Image (cartoon, rainbow, N blue to C red):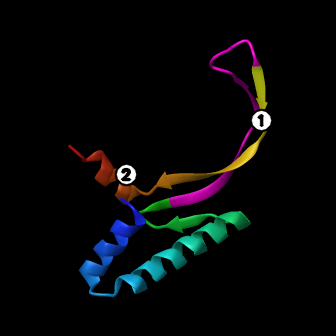
Amino acid sequence: MTKRELVNRIADETGLIQQQVYLVIQKTLDAITESLVKGDTVEFRDFGVFEVKTRKARLGRNPNKPENTVPIPPRRVVKFKPGKAMKSKVLNLP
């Protein structure tokens, strides 16, 4: 699902103007991003948790020349852990 599809779906279900829905979704995503940049955890009950983790430095290999090792520096990544409600709905898919 794209952001555009989400805007259309919410606008159809609520009767709001698409521009208003788009603005609310964009502000929500901006707020989530700002919190993660600060190092905060973003938690939505029953949906999931976004958090910033630091990956350790490691050695990588060139798949074309496996004898060459390349140092990969540590870096920060965003992780998502699904909540209970989402997990149970996804597990019950056919």
- Magenta extent: 49-68
Q: Quadrant of residue 39?
A: bottom right
Q: Quadrant of residue 63?
A: top right
Tell me the mark number nearer the camera, choosing from 1 and 2: 1
Closer to the chain start, of discs 1 and 2, is 1
* Percent coordinates x, y for residue 15 in the rendering: 26, 87
Q: Residue at x 77, y 35 (%)?
A: 57
59 lies above or below 15 = above
* Percent coordinates x, y for residue 58 in the rendering: 75, 30
Q: Amino acid at mark 2?
A: Lys
Q: Amino acid at mark 1?
A: Ala
Q: Is residue 51 magenta?
A: yes
Q: Secondary structure at mark 2?
A: helix
Relative to the observer, which residue lies in front, 27 or 45?
Answer: 27
* Percent coordinates x, y for residue 72 in the rendering: 76, 34
Q: Is residue 94 magenta?
A: no
Residue picked out by circle 1: 57
Residue picked out by circle 2: 87
